[in-house]
Image (cartoon, rainbow, N blue to C red):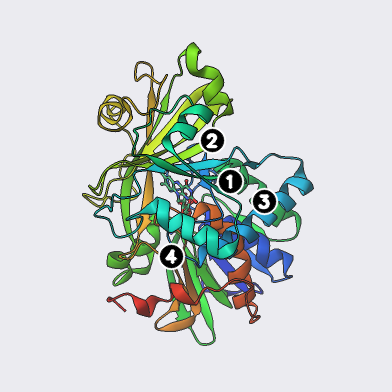
Amino acid sequence: MGDTVVSSFDVAVVGLGAAGSSLVRSLALDGISTIGFDQFHPPHEIGSSHGETRLTRVANGEGDVYAPMALRSIEIWRELEQETGEELFVECGAIIISNPDQVAERIVRKNFLRETQSVAERFGIPHEILDAEEIRYRFPHFGISDSDRAYYEPGAGYLKPELCISTQLAAAQRIGASLRFGTKVQSIEGRGGGVVITTNDESLEVGRVAVCAGPWAGELLGPPFLAALKPYRQTLHWFPIDGEYKEAWQAGPAFTWPHGTGSGDFFYGFPYLPSTGFAKVGTEGFAATTHPDLSLSIDQNAAWQVFERHLRGRLLGLHPTGAVSKSCQYTVTSDFQFVIDHHPDNENIWIISACSGHGFKHSPAVGEAVAALLNRVEPSVDLSGFALDRLDLF
Ligand SMILES: Cc1cc2nc3c(=O)[nH]c(=O)nc-3n(C[C@H](O)[C@H](O)[C@H](O)COP(=O)(O)OP(=O)(O)OC[C@H]3O[C@@H](n4cnc5c(N)ncnc54)[C@H](O)[C@@H]3O)c2cc1C
């Protein structure tokens, strides 16, 4: 490889998934000279942003900080829809069903229904609380116990992650961002007042770097990030729907269903998806970390196990015969909140990990706010709670 080329790019973004695609668009909109790199060709099926759907709600039981971000993100998704004519956000409503007296052994979402309800009340987000009878009446495809209650947010729904990413990348390119696909960044190193990025082909000096590498962030940044940003494999399953329940599934909301006190007693899902005619369900597991380069192939019997453990009697009209399964990766911090901060040793290197399983919905507001920070402007949403020094490792 030749000498380092001193470039005129103010910012390089490493990783062009959910976080990176939003950021390159926002940087380009702000008139900042931007280059983006991705080792693959996003959208792709290897990181954290695939699988057809991502739930979005304005009230999020993970914390108050997320409501303004979700609101701003929905505005940006709608702006992008206007610009491109694409449908990115399907506003089908979203429901959380659980026994509100159960408190689960989890780090977040211990009592997700009540936590979400109180965020909605504090921020004036339109919602309804439904008793068991009302849930059964409105959503006959859910098998409800008498002790169940629901938080229902009519303005919520799901995003189409692959389309969101490709739309943002195309928009970024149209307004001047330079994007390099199939280019893996091998190292990032502060030098003088800038940062040197080394790929297989070249060494480039830029002003600042934003690392949006999703599950690969720890590997690229090294310790202590390897321990702070841990990848966990999660599974997704698409189930065929019986004719008898098809209408209910077509009209139904996206759903989140904590159904016990164990850390894994939780699933979420989406109504009838026109692309496949199936309904999709996901679970969460944190028993063992993974490596992002390991194969994402999955035992196709996994859908049967998920059905028996979580869905039987709860999701009516779904059956595991003919189900299709995939896996995807969460990048998780110890408190399940995001990391958005500069590197402890270099203020020109930023780390943006908007994940822990709830980052997609917020990615455009995060991209806009990080672009503002990189432009030395006050961001419109508060990112101070995502500083690295809240974590024991920093
Ligand atoms: C199964 C599952 C379900 C989820 N459900 C929801 C949900 O319902 N709602 C919600 O809001 N969020 C949800 N999330 C979380 C959300 O999807 C993630 O927060 C988000 O997709 C993370 O995006 P990212 O940009 O950080 O990572 P990614 O989208 O994985 O992007 C990282 C990119 O960096 C690139 N890269 C990595 N290293 C390098 C390198 N060295 N050089 C060049 N490129 C590199 C990769 O190729 C990749 O394209 C879910 C996540 C999963 C896995």
- Taking the image as drawn, is residue 61 in sight? no
The relative height of residue 23 versus residue 386 in the rendered view (above or below) is: above
**Residue that appears at 35% across and 16% down:** 321
Query: Nearer the N terminus, badge 3 or badge 1?
Result: 3
Q: Secondary structure at mark 3?
A: helix
Label 3 – label 2 distance at C-alpha: 19 Å
Determine if residue 204 is in view. Answer: yes
Going from N to C along the chain, the mark reached first, 4 or 1, is 1
Tell me the residue that label 1 is attached to: 156
Q: Which mark is residue 77?
A: 3
Q: CA distance from mark 4 to mark 1?
A: 21 Å
Q: Position of residue 241 (x, y in %)?
A: 46, 18
- Residues at marks 1 and 2, CA–CA distance in whole angstroms: 9 Å
- Sequence order check, earlier mark of 3 and 4: 3
Which structural element holds mark 4? Answer: loop
What's the distance in space between the residues labelled 2 and 4, CA to CA?
Answer: 27 Å
Q: Are marks 1 and 2 in contact (CB under 8 Å)?
A: yes
Q: Are marks 3 and 1 in contact (CB under 8 Å)?
A: no
Residue holding disc 2: 253
- Which amino acid type corresponds to the residue marked 2 in the rendered image? Pro
